[in-house]
Amino acid sequence: MSLRRRQRPHRHLARRHRWGRVLPGAAERPPAPFGPDAVEVHARALRLGDEWCRTVSVTGYPREVGLGWLEPLATHPGRLGVALHIEPVPPAVAADRLRRQLARLESGRRTDAAKGRLADPEVEVAAEDARDLAAGLARGEQKLFRVALTVTVHASSEQALDTECKAVRALCSSLLLDTQPATWRSLQGWATTLPLGVDALMVRRSFDTAALSAAYPFASGELSSTTGVLYGTAAKGAGLVCWDRFACDNYNSVILARSGAGKSYLAKLEALRSLYRGIEVAVVDPEDEYARLAKGVGGAYVHLGAPGVRVNPFDLTPGPEPLVRQALFVHTLIAVLLGEPVGPAAKPALDRAILAAYEQVGITNDPRTHARPAPLLADLTAALDAAPEDQAQMLAARLAPFVTGTHRGLFDGPTTQRPDGHLVVFSLRDLPDELKAAGTLLTLNNIWRRVANPAARRRRLVIVDEAWLLMRDPEGARFLFRMAKSARKHWCGLTVVTQDAADLLGSPLGQAVVANAATQILLRQAPQAIDALAEAFRLSEGERAYLLGAQRGEGLLSCGPDRVAFAALSSSSEHDWCTSDPAELAGSEPDL
């Protein structure tokens, strides 16, 4: 029997320019037909134009299924149409059916026992499952569904169709699924697997909630979580890789990759999807790559290095002993500005000068004085100049470029912006190289004061992009290490992103930062760095080869001994906010 669809004559449509103007003399090609030009129905197969197809229905299922048990069908290399039709059963109807089923099973068991027959194991198991399901329905923990699983196999010829059907039925058998071809119902079977929502075969089986949820075709049986952030698709199969870093022992993560491998893109995706979950995000952005994301989601944007933007490192914040804590931070900042630790002879003089600078503006250990305007870096250098020690005057001379010289713009006045919100981005691109490490340290201190505030405790994510800028300085590395150690106590996760794995793994502090990150992400690596990474993360030969040949956005997500290979996945709107490709960004930079 042949069913042919009459083709309607099409009209040539004028092609329009993207601004709406019709180009003269331009015409589009006629649209391709939606379906085949002919359907030839046979007893066991269909001929659709130039190809053949056959439908099989799943009639038997295993007693227990695991997460992602339908994934082998979704990832089969041949062309398959897989339809899963689901019909919920009302709780009252489901309870009545289960009650009748239990009565039949119990009656059969008692009849066998009365006649002295041995108990049937299949009946025992069915009765136990029915009782468990009935109990779950009564407690409201489970629901009952009528489910039909239908598979249509496509091939280029009838002989190839036979071979492909054997392979598909063998695959179903390996999954403990019983299949039957839709003989004399091939047209209905093909219609069942079309995206029409029509089940013409009606070969159904009862499923509970747990079994049906495990049938989700994109479930991954590997490293996954039901409450986390979507990172992408698993490299093996079509499963989705979701991970909840806040469910780990600590909430920190590291992202290591060579330049251009997509590490910042992945960090922006994670930040965006963390915002969906109500997590507050702060970013240290040395290359101004997060500006589009901040504008897209209505976040705050602090452009350090821009005219008039200043940060005062002497500002006090609420908390225990704020004066002492801020004085210790100033010690660290001075060491970073000088490029080396302050010597033991000059450190006492520096400490006295810091306290003297606070005293000059009336700030003491008395909490009532902490609301007064804080001193500036110029006040510190004045206190150092006034000190009798030669070491103090030498420190003042070395700090002159940051007070009266070319680098004074960042410290020449009180803090101009105190950002707040669900996303705060600190851009460091316009800072000179001599101030990049100091700017990173200042922003981290600003972020840490918010994180450590017990009055505003909530889940937070702190992203330090291009962390090698801070790790190359000993004092900056110590600050980052202390933050990695203490972040968990304040419900905060630290993300360290770097393209220079040697700076991170080449020092004990960097190794400690990696050790304190429960989530570790490795993207494409350079051959020069793969040996150090393989030793630090205990990579196998296959994992080494995968990281060396990975495409952009592909990598390994690791948590302890568990690892999964994945590829980052984003929507078109997410891509517009996260991309940093110069070819895509040409002429589309946001005004900030």
Image (cartoon, grey):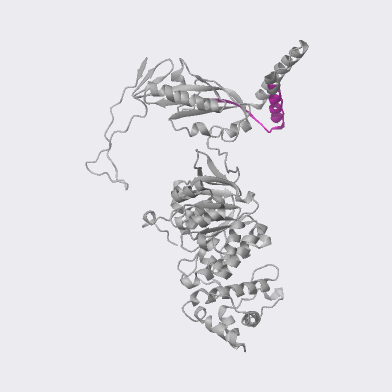
| View extreme (left): residue | 25
Task: Give the prevailing secondary structure in the magenta stretch.
Answer: helix
Q: Is residue 156 above or below residue 258?
A: above
Q: Is residue 141 magenta?
A: yes
- Looking at the rendering, the stretch of residues picked out in magenta corresponds to 126-148
Does residue 243 appear left or right of residue 198 in this picture? right
- x and y percentages locating residue 167 in the rendered image: 47, 26
Residue 98, picture quadrant: top right
- x and y percentages locating residue 88 in the rendered image: 60, 28
Any part of residue 467 in sight: no
Between 390 and 545, the residue placed more toward the observer is 545
Between 346 and 296, the residue placed more toward the observer is 346
Between 285 and 69, the residue placed more toward the observer is 69
Q: Is residue 68 above or below residue 39?
A: below
Instruction: Count all numbered tags in the image, as a single digit.
Output: 0
Q: Is residue 576 magenta?
A: no
Quadrant for the N terminus in the image: top left
Q: Is residue 249 above or below residue 123?
A: below
- x and y percentages locating residue 226 in the rendered image: 60, 42
Quadrant for the C terminus in the image: bottom left
Residue drawn at x 76%, y 10% is: 115
- x and y percentages locating residue 537 in the rendered image: 56, 53
Residue 420, picture quadrant: bottom right
Any part of residue 280 in sight: yes
Residue 462, picture quadrant: bottom right
